[in-house]
Image: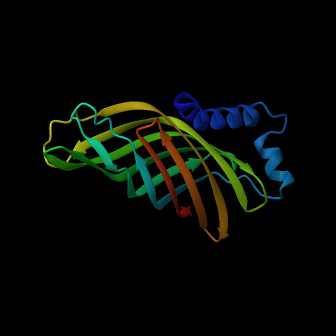
Amino acid sequence: MKILNKVKPLSFVIVGLTVALFSPVKAGELDKKLGSETIKHWYVGANLGQSKLEPNVTVVGGIVDDNKSNAYKVYGGYKFTNSLAIEAFYSDLGAAHIDIITDESDIDYKAFGAGLVLSLPITRKLKVQGKVGYGALKNDIKNGLAYEQIEENMVYSGLGFEYYLGGKLSWRFDYDHFDKDYQLLSTGLQFNF
Protein backbone atom coordinates (compact mmCIF):
# COMPACT_ATOMS: atom_id res chain seq x y z
CA MET A 1 0.00 0.00 0.00
CA LYS A 2 2.89 2.40 0.77
CA ILE A 3 4.34 1.84 -2.71
CA LEU A 4 0.97 2.72 -4.27
CA ASN A 5 0.85 5.99 -2.30
CA LYS A 6 4.28 6.97 -3.68
CA VAL A 7 3.35 6.15 -7.27
CA LYS A 8 -0.09 7.84 -7.42
CA PRO A 9 0.84 11.56 -7.59
CA LEU A 10 3.61 11.06 -10.14
CA SER A 11 1.49 8.71 -12.26
CA PHE A 12 -1.31 11.31 -12.55
CA VAL A 13 1.17 13.89 -13.82
CA ILE A 14 2.81 11.44 -16.26
CA VAL A 15 -0.56 10.33 -17.69
CA GLY A 16 -1.70 13.96 -18.02
CA LEU A 17 1.50 15.05 -19.74
CA THR A 18 1.41 12.06 -22.09
CA VAL A 19 -2.20 12.70 -23.12
CA ALA A 20 -1.50 16.40 -23.66
CA LEU A 21 1.73 15.92 -25.60
CA PHE A 22 0.30 13.27 -27.93
CA SER A 23 -3.14 14.83 -28.30
CA PRO A 24 -4.12 15.59 -31.91
CA VAL A 25 -5.08 19.15 -30.92
CA LYS A 26 -2.07 21.45 -30.66
CA ALA A 27 -1.85 24.10 -27.93
CA GLY A 28 -2.35 27.00 -30.34
CA GLU A 29 -5.40 25.35 -31.91
CA LEU A 30 -6.89 24.70 -28.48
CA ASP A 31 -6.35 28.34 -27.50
CA LYS A 32 -8.13 29.49 -30.69
CA LYS A 33 -11.07 27.16 -30.02
CA LEU A 34 -11.42 28.63 -26.53
CA GLY A 35 -11.22 32.16 -27.90
CA SER A 36 -7.96 33.12 -26.22
CA GLU A 37 -4.69 34.24 -27.72
CA THR A 38 -1.41 32.53 -27.04
CA ILE A 39 0.65 35.22 -25.36
CA LYS A 40 4.20 34.43 -24.25
CA HIS A 41 4.94 36.05 -20.90
CA TRP A 42 6.76 35.91 -17.57
CA TYR A 43 4.94 35.39 -14.27
CA VAL A 44 5.68 35.35 -10.53
CA GLY A 45 3.61 34.20 -7.59
CA ALA A 46 3.43 33.40 -3.91
CA ASN A 47 1.41 30.73 -2.11
CA LEU A 48 0.63 29.99 1.53
CA GLY A 49 -0.39 26.56 2.73
CA GLN A 50 0.28 23.54 4.86
CA SER A 51 3.03 20.96 4.50
CA LYS A 52 3.16 17.34 5.58
CA LEU A 53 6.70 16.32 6.55
CA GLU A 54 7.99 12.79 7.15
CA PRO A 55 11.54 12.78 8.54
CA ASN A 56 13.20 9.43 9.18
CA VAL A 57 13.77 9.59 12.94
CA THR A 58 14.36 5.88 13.58
CA VAL A 59 18.11 6.62 13.57
CA VAL A 60 17.84 8.82 16.66
CA GLY A 61 15.19 6.66 18.35
CA GLY A 62 12.50 9.32 18.25
CA ILE A 63 8.96 9.70 17.04
CA VAL A 64 7.43 12.43 14.91
CA ASP A 65 5.10 14.28 17.25
CA ASP A 66 3.78 16.87 14.75
CA ASN A 67 4.34 16.43 11.01
CA LYS A 68 2.19 19.30 9.70
CA SER A 69 3.42 22.87 9.44
CA ASN A 70 2.52 26.22 7.91
CA ALA A 71 4.51 26.78 4.74
CA TYR A 72 5.00 29.15 1.84
CA LYS A 73 6.21 28.94 -1.73
CA VAL A 74 7.44 31.62 -4.15
CA TYR A 75 7.77 30.84 -7.83
CA GLY A 76 8.36 32.36 -11.22
CA GLY A 77 8.20 31.13 -14.74
CA TYR A 78 7.80 31.74 -18.42
CA LYS A 79 4.77 30.65 -20.47
CA PHE A 80 5.68 29.59 -23.99
CA THR A 81 2.01 28.98 -24.82
CA ASN A 82 -1.18 29.05 -22.76
CA SER A 83 -0.55 25.33 -22.18
CA LEU A 84 3.21 25.03 -21.58
CA ALA A 85 5.50 26.84 -19.14
CA ILE A 86 8.80 26.39 -17.36
CA GLU A 87 8.78 27.27 -13.66
CA ALA A 88 11.26 27.59 -10.78
CA PHE A 89 10.30 27.67 -7.10
CA TYR A 90 11.55 27.98 -3.52
CA SER A 91 9.54 26.58 -0.58
CA ASP A 92 10.00 27.06 3.15
CA LEU A 93 8.06 24.07 4.41
CA GLY A 94 8.19 24.74 8.13
CA ALA A 95 9.26 22.09 10.62
CA ALA A 96 8.39 18.62 11.88
CA HIS A 97 8.51 18.26 15.66
CA ILE A 98 10.21 15.10 17.00
CA ASP A 99 10.29 13.68 20.51
CA ILE A 100 13.23 11.65 21.76
CA ILE A 101 13.34 9.99 25.17
CA THR A 102 15.61 12.64 26.67
CA ASP A 103 14.97 15.61 24.38
CA GLU A 104 12.84 17.15 21.63
CA SER A 105 13.59 19.15 18.53
CA ASP A 106 12.30 20.53 15.25
CA ILE A 107 13.57 19.55 11.81
CA ASP A 108 13.26 22.42 9.31
CA TYR A 109 12.59 21.69 5.63
CA LYS A 110 13.31 23.79 2.55
CA ALA A 111 13.04 22.89 -1.13
CA PHE A 112 13.78 24.46 -4.49
CA GLY A 113 13.66 23.29 -8.07
CA ALA A 114 12.56 23.84 -11.65
CA GLY A 115 10.38 21.98 -14.10
CA LEU A 116 7.66 21.98 -16.73
CA VAL A 117 4.07 23.05 -16.11
CA LEU A 118 1.39 21.79 -18.48
CA SER A 119 -1.97 23.59 -18.34
CA LEU A 120 -5.13 22.20 -19.87
CA PRO A 121 -8.09 24.58 -20.11
CA ILE A 122 -11.40 23.55 -18.57
CA THR A 123 -13.11 26.89 -19.29
CA ARG A 124 -11.84 30.22 -20.62
CA LYS A 125 -10.69 31.20 -17.12
CA LEU A 126 -9.93 27.88 -15.39
CA LYS A 127 -7.03 25.55 -16.17
CA VAL A 128 -5.91 22.30 -14.57
CA GLN A 129 -2.14 21.96 -14.25
CA GLY A 130 0.35 19.13 -14.04
CA LYS A 131 3.97 19.69 -13.01
CA VAL A 132 7.09 17.59 -13.18
CA GLY A 133 10.67 18.68 -12.56
CA TYR A 134 13.88 18.26 -10.66
CA GLY A 135 14.70 19.85 -7.33
CA ALA A 136 16.56 19.72 -4.06
CA LEU A 137 15.21 19.04 -0.59
CA LYS A 138 17.19 20.20 2.44
CA ASN A 139 16.51 19.73 6.13
CA ASP A 140 18.25 20.94 9.23
CA ILE A 141 17.77 20.21 12.92
CA LYS A 142 17.42 23.19 15.25
CA ASN A 143 19.10 22.16 18.52
CA GLY A 144 21.96 19.95 17.37
CA LEU A 145 20.61 16.46 18.06
CA ALA A 146 22.47 13.66 16.32
CA TYR A 147 20.31 13.70 13.20
CA GLU A 148 21.70 13.29 9.71
CA GLN A 149 21.07 16.43 7.70
CA ILE A 150 19.68 15.53 4.32
CA GLU A 151 20.32 17.35 1.07
CA GLU A 152 18.64 15.29 -1.60
CA ASN A 153 18.11 15.91 -5.29
CA MET A 154 15.05 14.23 -6.75
CA VAL A 155 12.19 14.39 -9.20
CA TYR A 156 9.12 16.22 -7.95
CA SER A 157 5.59 16.30 -9.30
CA GLY A 158 2.44 18.26 -8.70
CA LEU A 159 -1.12 19.03 -9.67
CA GLY A 160 -3.11 22.23 -9.45
CA PHE A 161 -5.52 24.78 -10.82
CA GLU A 162 -5.08 28.28 -12.19
CA TYR A 163 -8.05 30.65 -12.34
CA TYR A 164 -7.74 33.92 -14.26
CA LEU A 165 -9.11 36.76 -12.06
CA GLY A 166 -8.75 39.58 -14.58
CA GLY A 167 -6.15 42.17 -15.42
CA LYS A 168 -2.77 40.56 -14.71
CA LEU A 169 -3.83 38.39 -11.76
CA SER A 170 -4.51 34.69 -11.47
CA TRP A 171 -5.36 32.53 -8.45
CA ARG A 172 -3.39 29.28 -8.02
CA PHE A 173 -4.12 26.16 -6.00
CA ASP A 174 -1.17 23.70 -5.94
CA TYR A 175 -0.30 20.28 -4.60
CA ASP A 176 3.47 19.55 -4.68
CA HIS A 177 4.98 16.16 -3.92
CA PHE A 178 8.65 15.32 -3.16
CA ASP A 179 8.74 11.59 -2.46
CA LYS A 180 7.34 10.84 1.01
CA ASP A 181 9.56 13.44 2.71
CA TYR A 182 7.27 16.35 2.01
CA GLN A 183 3.97 17.27 0.47
CA LEU A 184 2.63 20.81 0.17
CA LEU A 185 -0.95 21.98 -0.34
CA SER A 186 -1.03 25.73 -1.02
CA THR A 187 -2.97 28.58 -2.58
CA GLY A 188 -2.03 32.09 -3.63
CA LEU A 189 -1.84 34.78 -6.29
CA GLN A 190 0.11 34.89 -9.53
CA PHE A 191 1.07 38.12 -11.31
CA ASN A 192 1.41 37.86 -15.10
CA PHE A 193 3.68 40.34 -16.90
Horizontal side of residue 47 vs 69, given as left or right: right
Residue 59: x %, y % from top left: 24, 30
Q: Is residue 35 shown above or below 131?
A: below
Residue 139: x %, y % from top left: 28, 41
Q: Is residue 84 shown above or below 50?
A: above
Q: Relative to the observer, which residue lies in front, 29 or 164?
A: 164
Residue 150: x %, y % from top left: 28, 34
Tell me the quarter of the picture where residue 148 sits.
top left
Q: Is residue 136 shown above or below 31?
A: above
Horizontal side of residue 154 vs 39, given as left or right: left
Horizontal side of residue 78 vs 119, given as left or right: left
Which residue is depicted at the point 80% across and 39% down?
26
Q: Check the image and name the residue furthest to the front.
A: 101
Q: Relative to the observer, which residue lies in front, 73 or 57?
A: 57
Q: Relative to the observer, which residue lies in front, 152 or 123?
A: 152
Give the mark count.
0
Q: Which quarter of the image is occupied by the C terminus? A: bottom right
Which residue is depicted at the point 59% across and 38% down?
9
